[in-house]
Image: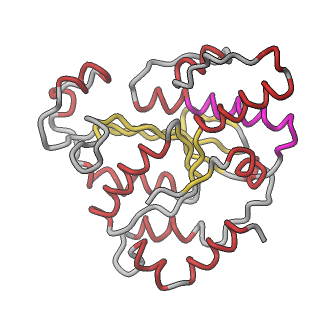
Amino acid sequence: MHALSLAHSFVSRHPLWQWLFGEQHAHPAILANNAAFRNLNQNRPIEDYDFVVLDTELTGFSVGEDAILSIGAVRIKGMRLNPADSFFAMVDPGRSLPKASTLVHRITPQAVQGRPRLQEVLPALVEYCNGSLIVGHHVGLDMRFLNHACKRHLGGTLATPCLDTLKLAQVYEAEQWENYYDRYQTGVSFQLGDLAVRYGLPLFDRHDALQDAMQTAYLFLFLVRSLRQGGIATLKDLYLSGRSWRFYF
């Protein structure tokens, strides 16, 4: 058994698991989601897994000081994207918005006024993600904010493996260098929009949570299909290709 599977199987039965994820008092949505990953089989074909591609818009990058303003997510089933199967929520952070953040994502104080608070949105988001692997571009930032909020408002964190399209893009570019050295470019930008242009993908508005989630979903599909030509067939293969699978507590 793969080392990650052994570790995951052990902690899911260990009392420490209950302490980390708040099994005793967590919201039912957290419990249901985490139960889905206690015995995750990594050896099935990639098409067998569901993925939720998500993005957040933030007031800044400090988990302790900044807040989530919007969350967007789309689902991939059978390696197919259904744009109609999506999640989007604007959030009232209950605090003033820094002008610098408004200049980036164009979310004004008026846009979030009267919107639900984050604790009202989180249960529906967790239910939407239930049992699906999470994908994001620089996904660690999104998950640190979400799990900080889940622990505070829902009594536990998401024990969901996450895949980072930024890391997968780095793997793909390295593969291009190894197999087709004349295609390698040292000045590659790994910004989401720049990668979409580089790979000829459909373009969406930047700094909009749902639009960025859609952009990331197209990037994920492109990268997985491209990497599969190099022999990647299972979830385990995808993980080993770039060590891009992580948990964010």
Q: Quadrant of the N terminus?
A: bottom right
Name above or below for residue 142 compared with residue 157: above
Quarter of the image for residue 218 reads top right
Find residue 139 and report its horizontal and vertical position in percent.
Answer: 49, 43
Q: Residue visible at 54% across and 34% down? A: 84
Relative to residue 2, is residue 19 drawn left or right?
Answer: left
Residue 81 vs 199, above or below: the answer is below
Rendered location of residue 55, percent (x, y): 44, 37
Q: Position of residue 204 (x, y in %)?
A: 50, 19
Q: Is residue 222 magenta?
A: yes
The image quarter in which residue 69 lies: top left
Please state the extent of the stretch shown in magenta in the rendering.
216-232
- On screen, residue 226 versus residue 31, left or right, reads right
Nearer-the-camera pick, 123 or 187: 187
**Residue located at (69% from left, 74% from top):** 6
The relative height of residue 166 versus residue 9 in the rendered view (above or below) is: above
How many marks are shown on the rendered structure? Answer: 0
